[in-house]
Image (cartoon, rainbow, N blue to C red):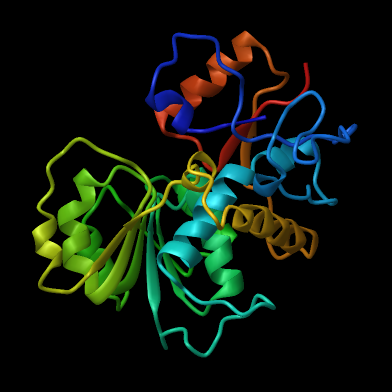
Amino acid sequence: MAQDQTQRKVPHWSPKVLDYDVAGVVFAVEPDAPSSKLYHAVDERIVGRKPASLSFADAAALPLTSITAWEALFHRLGVPTSSAGAATTSTKKNASVLILNGAGGVGSIAIQLAKQLTDLTVIATASRPESEAWVKDLGADHVVNHRGDIVSQLSALGFPQVDYILVFTDLPPHFDTIIEVIKPQGKICAIASFQDNLPFQKLFAKSVTFVWELMFTRAVFNTEDIIEQHRLLNQVSALVDAKRLRTTVGKTFGTINAANLKLAHAALEARTVVGKVVLSGF
């Protein structure tokens, strides 16, 4: 079972079934319930095959973040890939993507997807030596410190503006920077809602596309294309087994119990974790 930032954003006072990210075994399928599995009912269209090369703990770190990163990069921003997983000729030449919060759970898989399946130059943000080393090891071409002046750092790297921006952190603190560094006709995708009133009209002059990504949208609204989540999870699984992607587990907290859950959430709330935190077994 993997813990994620989404669990700490809204307190739940009523009983709750944990968790969003899991890896397990299908023991039986009821004849009259082809889309449900014994012990934990789940729609087969939103689950995928576990990578054979990973432990259950390492596999549990992947589903939520993989869906979010894949949908953001390929379904929302529209960065193209071929059916074989190679970048197509329609990918912009010398195109670049800025990933805010590159060392987080979603950023950690997005870096790998962008490097493995596209020709994008990947620029990720990180603020500590360990998180900088983490994103470089995942394949980021360049790293900038989001606690510093992102604009000047990008310019120093030769990227005064970028084609795509993936906002895997709170948008308001970075909004002015994003406006400045996005290219005309560029695309931005954000995954975190907010209460602030932001001046989105500033995007108008550059004809910038702004889109949201929420991995629950397809499941909650039972969209016609919900099966895409099953398909992309199987693609991620195949990429992991082919050694093209790796698990994003940053730290494990032992067995699943109240004490370890508190420790895991405390680590998430401190915002110093790289990758995902995982608990396994009872």
Name the residue located 84 percent from the left edge and 51 percent from the top edge. Answer: 53
Residue 63 located left or right of residue 157 = right
In this view of the protein, which residue sits in the foreground, 126 or 83?
83
Name the residue located 59 percent from the left edge and 73 percent from the top edge. Answer: 117
**Which quadrant is home to the C terminus?**
top right
Relative to 208, say whether 212 is above or below.
above
In this view of the protein, which residue sits in the foreground, 105 or 198?
198
Q: Is residue 258 visible?
A: yes
Residue 177 located left or right of residue 158 = left
Image coordinates of residue 200 in percent, x first then y, are 14, 56
Image coordinates of residue 165 in percent, x first then y, are 34, 63
Name the residue located 61 percent from the left edge and 80 percent from the top edge. Answer: 82
Classify residue 64 by image quadrant.
Answer: top right
Image coordinates of residue 179 in percent, x first then y, are 17, 63
Name the residue located 34 percent from the left edge and 42 percent from the top edge. Answer: 192
Classify residue 172 by image quadrant.
Answer: top left
**Which quadrant is home to the N terminus?**
top right
